[in-house]
Amino acid sequence: MGALGEGSDTVKPVILFLGQQSWRAGAERVLEEVLHAVEREFTPLVALPEPGPFAEALRARRIETLFFPLGRYRSGPKSMADIAAFPYRSALCASWAARVIRKRRVSMVYINGPRCLWAGALAARLTRTPSLFHLHITLTRRVDRFVSALGCQQVAKIVACSRTAADALLHNHASLVRRLEVIYNPVRSFPPAASLAWPDGGAIGSSERAAQPIVGVVGRITPAKGQHIALGALARLVRNGLNPRLILVGAPDPHSAQDKTYRAAIESSARALGLGERVWLPGYQENPGPFYRAFDVVVIPTLTTHGEGLPMVALEAMHAGVPVIGSAVGGVVEIVQDGRNGFLVPPGDDIALSSRLEQLLTNAELQRLLRAGALATVDSRFFVTTFHGAISRAVCELCSPLPGSADSGLLLRRGSIR
C-alpha cells in the first residue's frame, strides 16, 4: 500500500474496486475518473476478470491490479448457461474478495457493475466492510431489476449515472432511494491529434463537409448497438440523392464470436448495397477526438435490448458541438432533447432515422441551432471537477481518508452497513 508522503509511515486506506471486464468501455472510462478522484487520499486496488488493455492502462498509472474468477457473460439478455453460472461464480468471487479484504485490510468495496454486484455485496457483508455500487446502465428487464435490487439492499450506497438508470432500479423497489445518489458521468476534452484521412488517402477537410457530410457512430460493434440501423438509414439517404459517408468507430468484444460475425455482416451489407466506399470502420480509437471533430452528426442507433445508462458518446459529441440523433431508449432521452441538441427516433427504425438525418443535413440553419444547443447541454453537471467532488464525498461517507486531509473530519465507518 502506498504511503501518504515521503518520510511518512502512515498508509492510506485501501479501496477494493471490482470491475466486470478487462477492456475499456464506458464503465471503465468512468472508473478511471473515479480513481483520479480518490487516489490522492486512498490506495486503489482494482480487481478484473482477466488481463487486458484496461488492466495494462491501470498498471501504467502504477495502480495495482488483481484478477478474480468472474468469468465472461454475453452482452444483453443472458443465455441459460450464463444464468446458471451466475450464482456459483458470484459465491466463488465473494469468497475470493473476502480473503483479499482481510489480507489487505480493505476499508471499502467499490462495485463497478451489476455482474460483480452480488460478489462484492456478499464479500462486504462477510467482512463487515462498507460497499458502494456504481450503476452504469438502465436495467430494462424485470428479472435484472429484481436481482440487482436484492443485491443493492446489501450495499451501503448506490451511485447511478443518470436519473433514468436510477428510476429503473427504483421501480417496485422505492426503499432503495435512501441510499441512492445520481452522479452524472463526466466528459473531458480529447488531446490534440493529427487530422484524419480516408482509407484511400483523401483528407477529411472542411471543404468537403457541405458536399459530403459525415455521419458518425461511436461504440462497440455489436448487434444491440444497432450499427446496421445506421447503415440502412445511409442507404435511404443515398437513394434520396444525398451524398453522405458513414464512419463506425469501435470494435467488437475481442471474446465475442457474435460481435465479430456482426462486423463482417456490416461490411458485407455495405458492399451489397453499393456503399462500400461510403462506409469506414476504423476500429477502436483510444483518442476519438479527431472523429468527433469531423462528424456533422452523431447517431446512437441503440436497440431496446441494450440498456443505455447515460451514453458517453452523446456527452462527447455534444462537448464537441455535434448534434446527436439517438434512439429513444434509456438515458439517451435524458440528454438528447428533440429539436434543441438533436432528435430522438424510435429504436430500430431506419426510416425515421434517415428522415431526421435528411432534415438535419439539408438545413444549414438547423445545423447551426443544434450545434449551439449541443454545446450548451454539457453544463456543470458533466464537468470533471463536479464528478470528482461528488464521488469523493460519496466515498468519504463510508470510508474517511487519513487525518490531516481535507476530508478527515469524517470517521472511518468500517463495519457500518445500512
Image (tube, helix red, strand yellow):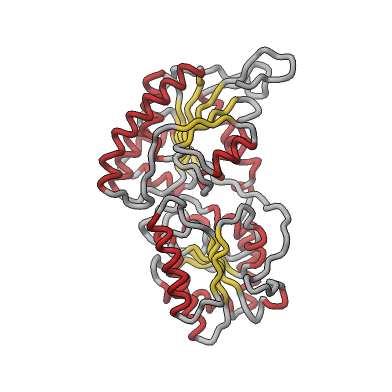
- Indicate the quadrant containing the N terminus: top left, top right, bottom left or bottom right: top right
State the residue in front, 178 or 151. 151
Residue 174, above or below 230: above
Residue depicted at 72% across the width and 73% down the height: 206
Residue depicted at 38% across the width and 22% down the height: 125
Looking at the picture, how far across and down is residue 366, in whole percent? 61, 74
Residue 418 in view here: no
Residue depicted at 50% across the width and 51% down the height: 310
State the residue in front, 401 or 202. 202
Looking at the picture, how far across and down is residue 255, in whole percent? 43, 50
**In screen coordinates, is 126 left or right of 52?**
left
Looking at the picture, how far across and down is residue 326, in whole percent? 48, 64
State the residue in front, 10 or 353. 10
- Which corner quadrant of the image does residue 131 belong to? top left
**In screen coordinates, is 226 left or right of 147?**
right
Residue 228 in view here: yes
**In screen coordinates, is 254 left or right of 406?**
left
Residue 229, above or below 100: below
- Indicate the quadrant containing the C terminus: top left, top right, bottom left or bottom right: top left
Residue depicted at 64% across the width and 58% down the height: 376
Residue 6, above or below 213: above
Looking at the picture, how far across and down is residue 160, in whole percent? 47, 42
